[in-house]
Image (tube, helix red, strand yellow):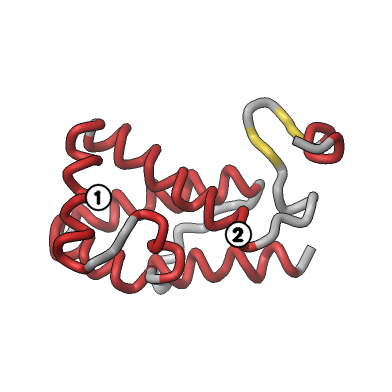
């Protein structure tokens, strides 16, 4: 961890937007947010089973999710139906919090739209 990153830490939240988080770092935070949400909402065993299902159903490894958001979203919709929105909103709220951004919860945005918006928000700083 760099000295600059340590200076921008507040509580348990890192202000990645202010320290110029590259997209790779944002993608890691997205995967961490997905892990956290799956564990909290579904439990560790279900999280592992869901990742295995993503690989089996879509050939979608955990590490590939940031590059294949539409596939991830479709699989979530197929698996959880309307409950997918609740899980995805939890993931997005965690991601935005980690990035130091405000999560608006707009109803006209898809999961991919929200993740893409983090790129623009970080670039606009």
Mark 1 neighbour class, 10 Å CA radius: few under 14, some 14 to 19, many 20 or more? some
Secondary structure beneath dot 1 equals: helix
Q: Which mark is residue 24?
A: 2
Residue 3 in picture, x, y percent from top left: 85, 34
Residue 16 percent across, percent down from the top left:
70, 48
Of residues 18 and 57, the one drawn nearer to the viewer in this rendering: 57
Image point (15%, 65%), residue name: 57
Of the 4 image quadrants, the one containing the C terminus is: bottom right
Does 96 sit left or right of 58 as displayed?
Answer: right
Q: Image point 30% across, 41% down: which residue? A: 38
Quarter of the figure with the N terminus: top right
> Residue 100 placed where, x, y %?
66, 46
Q: Residues within 10 Å of mark 2 (few under 14, many from 20)?
A: few
* Cα–Cα gap, marks 2 and 1: 21 Å
Q: Is tag 2's residue or tag 1's residue first in the polypeptide sequence?
A: 2
Q: Residue at x 19, y 50 (%)?
A: 52
In front here: 91 or 52?
52
Residue at 21% x, 65% y is 75
The part of the image, by quadrant, that contains residue 105 is bottom left
Residue under label 1, please give it.
Answer: 51
Residue 14 vs residue 73: left or right?
right
């Amino acid at each position: 961890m760099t000295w600059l990153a340590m200076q921008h830490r507040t509580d348990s939240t890192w202000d990645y937007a202010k320290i110029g988080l590259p997209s790779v770092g944002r993608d890691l935070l997205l995967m961490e947010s997905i892990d956290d949400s799956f564990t909290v909402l579904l439990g560790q065993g279900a999280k592992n089973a869901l990742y295995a299902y993503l690989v089996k159903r879509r050939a979608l490894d955990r590490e590939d999710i940031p590059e294949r958001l539409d596939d991830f979203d479709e699989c979530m919709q197929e698996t959880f139906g309307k409950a997918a929105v609740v899980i995805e909103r939890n993931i997005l709220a965690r991601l935005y919090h980690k990035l130091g951004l405000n999560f608006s919860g707009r109803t006209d945005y898809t999961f991919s739209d929200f993740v893409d918006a983090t790129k623009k928000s970080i670039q606009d700083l």
